Amino acid sequence: MNENQPASGLLGRDAQAVMRRIEGLEALLEEAFTVPGTNHRVGLDAIVGLVPVAGDVVTAAMGLYLVWEAKNLGLPKWKLWRMIGNVAVDSAVGAVPVAGDLFDFAFRSNRRNLKIVRAHLARHHPGTQTIEG
């Protein structure tokens, strides 16, 4: 945070603050770590998902938090249901031993949900767009 940004910048209810929280959690869940010896990035979703049952419950809850934040931005119900569907598929298939863990490395439900939120914001809150580098 820079000195010009208010301390409540991440805690606000405005679209930019919500988007920063969504982007930060998505990065943590999908690309926080690099697999040693490769250039492949994984996040807590894939790592915590290795813990049977509890890992899938925790990552599903974190994914549903993103949906809740999207609801706060005013996304329509059909987009929220699509996001819930992404989390549900990730959780259901991710719960299958071994195959589900491999699926977690490939199916990035939180990244898909971030795309849905970004598309909504680009149309309804154009001032929240960020430049990806």
Image (spheres, grey):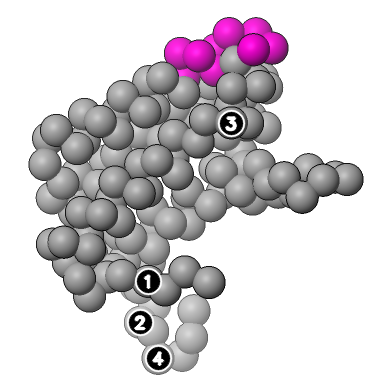
Tell me the CA gap for discs 4 and 1.
18 Å
Can residue 54 be seen in this snapshot? no
Q: Earlier in the sequence, mark 4 or mark 3?
A: 4
Q: Is residue 26 left or right of residue 100?
A: left
Q: Nearer the viewer, mark 4 or mark 3?
A: 3
Q: Nearer the viewer, residue 32 or 103?
A: 103
Report which residue position mark 1 lands on: 130
* Disc 4 target residue: 4
**Distance between mark 2 and mark 4 Cα atoms:** 6 Å
Residue, disc 2: 6
Q: Secondary structure at mark 2?
A: loop
Q: Which residue is mark 3?
A: 106
For the magenta stretch, what is the residue range? Answer: 91-99
Between the C-alphas of marks 1 and 3, the distance is: 25 Å
Q: Earlier in the sequence, mark 4 or mark 1?
A: 4
Circles 1, 3 touching at the beta carbon (< 8 Å): no
